[in-house]
């Protein structure tokens, strides 16, 4: 969209991630005159590199697939996890609106979701937790439908693609690994590969989009079909108004300053403060974690602008982020990638995590968020950042580790690049990674005894549904505990990184931004990671940020639609 003069709209939305695009789509479907501005030249933000899962208790997609869940049960779970009084109104609004917001999108747009079925909550042993039925994922999307606009979709991180550009989903992985084990798997894998080859003749990467990339592509496609105006390379720079109300915003667009007057308000969806050093120092635990997995353009612009107008920040008591351990991957071009250790390796049998003393400090199969919270806690007593994932040759061959995929023929390549440390004995490995050698030997000996009994008396690895879900069901007696005995031994450093921030602008249940005195700033909304996490910094289950991002984008627009328009 080309612009040279000031613009008048009903609703201005800033940021074309999942939150902002949902808001723009709902606004268009509700007949509002909407403008979406995006700071970069591509849509998707962090959402495009995400797994794309949404946590929507009581959703109809899972119910239709035979998985029963209820909002009441989810409420029980959140009461236990984050406290009964905490964020009650906002949380109730989220749970009550979630299924309807998703059905609304599915019925009226190309945004389509599939049930995940079994996908345990992250504290699956708490009252009200579900083992199945709460998570949904976007249906895969054919990027070819977007034509030239395909290049506008921010790609996933390279470490998550095969052959430099092919996306695969969870279901694909098992079939690709077992491609020589059954004729069906072989044909399936061959078809994927042929499609990818055909794509590469015309496109810079594969067009079979999965997970978060499918979500943002579906939102974008729906916006294009409705001809919703999107301004690229257009950053919201300042809000127009004061602590009582907002009437528009100033955009910076290709060297021009543009005034947008917004009759029904402005929705901030600029992705949170993941790459803003000052906010990281102000909100995050000390020492401030170095790495963020959020999109590098997420500089806290929405938060900054809201605060300039007197908006409050929340939640006050949290670690301010939703965390994952990451390993740092040296890339051939000299840059570094971050690989999130979400579900593939930590819970498998035959891997331990130790700190610099050579001791375990956590149930390795805990959720990625809880794993990092344990790193923070352990680091208060002994250096635990980085922590080390330690395993043996048999483990790597069977399950892989980080970017070393299962069955990789040459793990030595990753030792040469500096990604992995390796040694024939545990003592030598300990010296290489500067960990207490005698203690590491003792830790492994003790853990190997747990492998025989199946009981981890120290941290209870393998005791929860979540642990077992990500373990190896064929491994007995405990799907998450196995021997560490076959040299060479390997160690991989992992660091805390935020996949999303949880501190953001305080809002009410309609995503209206609140001032310090608790009153809303008229015409100002926040959603996605610009909005304070409804979970108050806790991580209940898969889809904890995208679920609320979509639901509060929907609620913001439904509120703005009924508000009295400002007339300048
Ligand atoms: C590896 C990984 C896996 C993940 N998996 C999941 C998952 O399965 N489920 C889940 O719930 N969460 C997941 N997340 C987190 C999730 O991706 C984010 O929480 C989510 O994308 C936040 O959405 P958003 O719209 O707020 O921000 P983003 O998706 O980051 O989008 C923000 C957009 O705003 C734009 N922007 C920034 N500043 C401005 C400005 N001044 N003006 C205009 N535009 C601006 C940015 O360019 C960007 O396009 C994952 C994250 C990672 C890294």
Image (cartoon, helix red, strand yellow):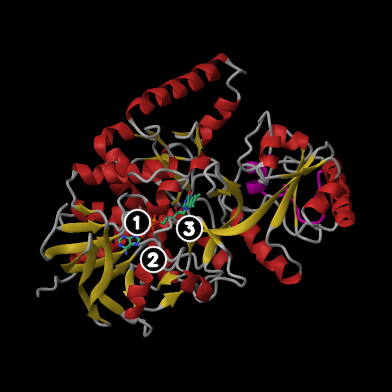
The residue under the point 20% across, 63% down is 11
Q: Earlier in the sequence, mark 2 or mark 1?
A: 1
Residue at figure coordinates x 20%, y 51% from the top left: 29
Specify whether 562 is left or right of 327. Answer: left
**Residue at the extreme front:** 334
Q: x and y percent of residue 167 in the render?
A: 46, 35
Quadrant of the image occupied by residue 343: top right
Q: Position of residue 328 (x, y in %)?
A: 60, 51
Query: Which quarter of the rendered image does ligand 1 occupy?
Result: bottom left
Q: Indicate whether 281 appears above or below 155.
A: below
Spatial separation of the CA atoms under disc 1 and disc 3:
26 Å
Disc 2 and disc 1: Cα gap in Å? Answer: 9 Å
Q: Is 247 placed left or right of 145 in the picture?
A: left
State yes or no: Cβ of the residue under disc 1 lies below 8 Å from any atom of ligand 1.
yes
- CB within 8 Å, label 3 to label 2: no
Q: Which residue shows up at 50% across the image and 31% down it? A: 163
Asked if residue 302 lies in the magenta stretch, the reply is no
Mark 2: is the Cβ under 8 angstroms from ligand 1?
yes
Looking at the image, is mark 1 or mark 3 nearer the viewer? 1
In the depicted view, which residue is nearer to us: 409 or 16? Answer: 409
The C terminus sits in image quarter: bottom left
User: Which span of residues is magenta-colored?
Assistant: 454-471
Q: Quadrant location of residue 185?
A: top right
The residue wearing badge 3 is 72
Q: Which residue is tagged 2? A: 530
């Amino acid at each position: 969209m080309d612009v040279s003069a000031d613009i008048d709209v009903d609703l201005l939305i800033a940021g074309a991630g999942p939150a902002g695009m949902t808001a723009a789509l709902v606004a268009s479907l509700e007949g509002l005159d909407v403008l979406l501005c995006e700071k970069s030249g591509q849509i998707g933000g962090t959402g495009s590199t995400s797994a794309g899962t949404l946590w929507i208790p009581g959703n109809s997609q899972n119910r239709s697939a035979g998985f029963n869940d209820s909002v009441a049960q989810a409420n029980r779970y959140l009461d236990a996890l984050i406290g009964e009084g905490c964020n009650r109104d906002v949380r109730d609004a989220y749970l009550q609106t979630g299924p309807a917001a998703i059905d609304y999108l599915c019925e009226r747009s190309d945004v389509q979701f599939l049930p995940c079925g079994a996908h345990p909550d992250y504290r699956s042993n708490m009252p009200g937790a579900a083992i199945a039925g709460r998570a949904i994922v976007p249906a895969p999307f054919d990027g070819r439908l977007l034509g030239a606009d395909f290049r506008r979709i921010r790609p996933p991180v390279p470490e998550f693609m095969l052959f430099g550009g092919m996306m695969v989903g969870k279901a694909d992985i098992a079939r690709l690994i077992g491609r020589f084990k059954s004729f069906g798997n072989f044909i399936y894998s061959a078809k994927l590969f042929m499609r990818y080859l055909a794509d590469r003749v015309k496109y810079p990467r594969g067009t079979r989009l999965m997970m978060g990339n499918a979500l943002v592509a579906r939102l974008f496609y729906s916006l294009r079909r409705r001809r919703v105006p999107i301004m690229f390379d257009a950053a919201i720079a300042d809000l127009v108004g004061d602590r009582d109300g907002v009437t528009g915003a100033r955009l910076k667009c290709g060297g021009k300053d543009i005034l947008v007057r917004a009759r029904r308000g402005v929705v901030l969806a600029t992705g949170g403060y993941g790459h803003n050093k000052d906010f990281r120092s102000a909100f995050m635990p000390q020492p401030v974690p170095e790495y963020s997995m959020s999109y590098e353009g997420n500089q806290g612009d929405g938060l900054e602008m809201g605060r300039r107008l007197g908006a409050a920040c929340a939640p006050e008591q949290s670690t301010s982020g939703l965390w994952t351990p990451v390993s740092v991957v040296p890339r051939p071009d000299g840059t570094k990638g971050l690989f999130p250790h979400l579900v593939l390796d930590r819970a498998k049998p035959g891997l331990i995590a130790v700190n610099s003393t050579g001791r375990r400090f956590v149930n390795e199969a805990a959720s990625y968020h809880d794993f990092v919270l344990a790193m923070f806690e352990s680091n208060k007593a002994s250096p635990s950042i980085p922590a080390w994932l330690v395993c043996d040759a048999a483990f790597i061959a069977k399950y892989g580790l980080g970017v070393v995929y299962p069955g990789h023929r040459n793990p030595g390549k990753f030792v040469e690049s500096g990604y992995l440390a390796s040694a024939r004995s545990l003592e030598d490995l300990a010296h290489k990674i500067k960990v207490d050698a005698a203690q590491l030997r003792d830790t492994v000996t003790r853990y190997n005894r747990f492998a025989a009994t199946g009981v981890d008396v120290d941290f209870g690895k393998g005791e929860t549904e979540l642990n077992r879900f990500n373990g190896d069901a064929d491994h007995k007696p405990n799907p998450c505990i196995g021997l560490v005995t076959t040299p060479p031994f390997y160690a991989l450093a992992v660091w805390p990184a935020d996949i999303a921030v949880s501190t953001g602008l305080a809002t009410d249940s309609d995503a209206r931004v609140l001032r310090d005195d608790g009153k809303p700033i008229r015409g100002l909304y926040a959603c996605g990671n610009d909005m304070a996490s409804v979970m108050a910094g806790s991580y209940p289950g898969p889809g904890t940020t995208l679920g609320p991002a979509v639901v509060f984008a929907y609620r913001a627009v439904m509120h703005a639609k009924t508000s009295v328009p400002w007339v300048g």
